[in-house]
Amino acid sequence: AQSVSQHNHHVILSEAASLELGCNYSYGGTVNLFWYVQYPGQHLQLLLKYFSGDPLVKGIKGFEAEFIKSKFSFNLRKPSVQWSDTAEYFCAVGTGRRALTFGSGTRLQVQP
Amino acid sequence: EAGVAQSPRYKIIEKRQSVAFWCNPISGHATLYWYQQILGQGPKLLIQFQNNGVVDDSQLPKDRFSAERLKGVDSTLKIQPAKLEDSAVYLCASSLGYGLANEKLFFGSGTQLSVL
């Protein structure tokens, strides 16, 4: 069975700091990887996704993530965070026809 | 485009009572999911429908939880009787295709259930 680990539960950064949120998955076959974001008071929405090809994927609002197969990782990055990036971030993995399995989430707090 | 609609937004019940949640997915979306999100955890799949058929209900506690999507459109999730550990946000999501792992999910705002 697939599983996802997000090791950072709560991250506090100042505006303009760089961000990297860790995500590791457990599955031996082909995976589809996602980052979803939930802004305060809003529903979960897709930030970016990886299916195949270039392991560096770019999403909305300047976010990017890199798939490193040898490390079973799909870390989320942003060079310079803004106060509006305050949200909860969820990594998710999909395999075959199975529904997505989500990590436990990372709460990001950006201080102005 | 209208999003995934869920109701109610909040529900407070006492243990052993029953409760029902409703979800209307985006029009035309074939696959519908119910996820349970306990505070401090990520969403956990309860049940996945493709049209009006169940694709995966392996993590649904069937002794107390039931769900249906009779006409392949909207869906109802029921808990009877509720336990304290059922306190969570119940999320409904839908996707356009047939539940392949590379499909984008569209989520509703969820129903926050508190069991006292």
Image: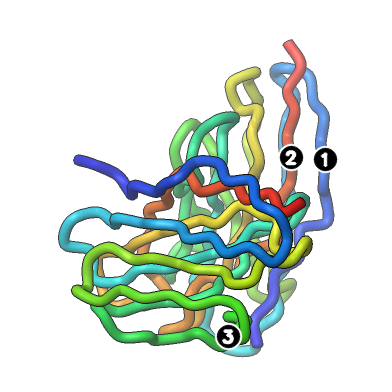
The answer to which quarter of the image holds residue A53 is: bottom left
Residue receiving disc 1: A10
In the rendered image, is residue A23 in sight? no
Q: Is residue B103 left or right of residue A100?
A: left
Residue at image point 64% right, 74% down? A69
C-beta proximity under 8 Å, tags 2 and 1: yes
List x then y, in percent, for residue B45: 56, 71
**B69 lies above or below A107:** below
Residue assigned mark 3:
B62
As drawn, the residue found furthest toward the top would be A112
Q: Amino acid at mark 3?
A: Lys
Q: Which residue is mark 2?
A: A107
Q: Quarter of the image containing the C terminus of chain A?
A: top right
Q: Residues within 10 Å of mark 2 (few under 14, many from 20)?
A: many
Residue, far left: B28
In this view, A96 is above or below B19: below
Residue B68: quarter of image: bottom left
Q: Vertical placement of A108 versus A98: above or below?
A: above
Q: Which residue is found at the position 73% from the left and 61% from the top? A: B15
Pick whichever, B81 or B74, lies toward us. Answer: B81
Circle 2 marks a residue in which chain?
Answer: A
Decide: marks 1, 3 in contact (CB < 8 A)? no
